Image (tube, rainbow, N blue to C red):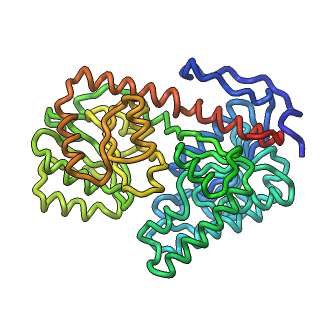
Amino acid sequence: MTTAKARARKRDAPPPNAPPDTPPPDTGGARMRVGILSQWYPPEPAFIPGELARELATRGHEVRVLTAFPSYPEGRVYAGYRQRWNDRTTTGSITVRRVPAYPSHDNSAARRVASYLSFAATSSLAGLRYLNGVDAIYVYHPPPTAYAAAGLLQLARRIPTVLHVQDMWPESVTASTMAPGGRAGSALHRALAASMRRLYRAASGIAVIAPSMAALLIERGADPGKVRTVLNWTDENLFRPVPATAAARRAIGHRDRCTVMFAGNLGPFQRVETAVRAAAAAGDRMDLVILGSGTQEPALRQLARQLRATNVRFLGHRPAQEMASLYAAAEYQLLTLRDLPALRGTVPSKLQAALACGRPVIASAAGDVARLVESAGAGLTCAPENWQKLAETFLTAAATPPAQRAETGRRALALYQDRMSLRVGVDQIEDMLAKVGTREAV
């Protein structure tokens, strides 16, 4: 294999908005050929692999992406795309090859498995030739089946890999509504856990999105020397500080009192029910506006009616391009999570989005999310799945003076820029790729 150090290049200057106290890592001044394996990729809302590819190319690396045809989240191939075997698009130093896969994102476990396994098969067939000769491969997980092609190349061509773990398997599967119960569920959990242990041992380097996740992977057999915490970035083209406008305040129905916004998926792991009950208890001191949809939306609407929570409003989906202005129109952004061990070691993307917009956060969560918010003074926290405590937190937020909220927002933005920005995250991934590509320790 040709190593990364064999192709020296001059490093690009950091972008003008880079945090001044975060110098770029020393990757040996080498220009790399990087493979990116991800079942999800733009135009899907998959900004982590998409922005990684773009930023690596900007830094002078050659990037080859192997992905499926876009179908997320509807489970249908996007208009303008037709599944075929050898679909390639080259833009500058980024080449994207798409391979067919069964598209499904509904609640059917069988169809979801078919989607994951079909991409594992087609990407493995295509990857042996398409990714041959790269210096290192980055694999975006979930699903972990995306690692199949990288595993083959590791065995056949000795190409090292960096696995980017976004959520914990098997918990994210077995705790979902798709998993079977009883003995079948226990057997599924054991089988997935064993598979993940083998995958962690096989990867040359592992990036995780939260400190507690790193500890959990090490506990499950990952080599501590391979694991690095790399906090996710957000789509900085969409989420950025903007001034609050009268139009945006009208759009969310702002009534000149403290408004807390939940924006995101209304699913079983978010437990937005806690927020609806808390808002009902807080009464007319504050408003809760909910943007987004999901499997729990009908039940949440019914709950708000039952509680006669007139201060809870459901706004449905809004275009991504509007989100920064809508965030600015609310006083706080809300993050709620179920109290599960696996979720204590994860940092949901809605936290980065709120921080990047410079908005104070209310976190009804445990673990790393709460520690990040508390340590930076970026908002308020309370115990998860406790509507009484969250109601008290809502009232505290409503009583906070505007000047104090503004200072909290400034600290929120500083937390994002210093620890979660695109440049900081790609610096670390680039460093990992360079080190595994030259057989150095991560």
In which quadrant of the rendered image does the C terminus lie?
A: top right
Residue 172, x across and y down, in percent: 49, 62
Identify the residue at the far front of this view. Answer: 219
Between 154 and 39, the one lying in front of the other is 154
Q: Can residue 370 be seen in this view?
A: yes
Horizontal side of 12 relative to 349 (left or right) equals right
Residue 224, x across and y down, in percent: 67, 46
Between 78 and 3, the one lying in front of the other is 3
Horizontal side of 204 relative to 75 (left or right) equals right
Q: Can residue 96 be seen in this view?
A: no
Residue 240, x across and y down, in percent: 42, 30
Quadrant position of residue 324: top left
What residue is shown at x 37% (from left), y 31% (from top)? 378
Up-down relation of residue 18 to residue 384 (above or below): above
Horizontal side of 166 relative to 195 (left or right) equals left
Between 126 and 48, the one lying in front of the other is 48
Residue 329, x across and y down, in percent: 27, 33
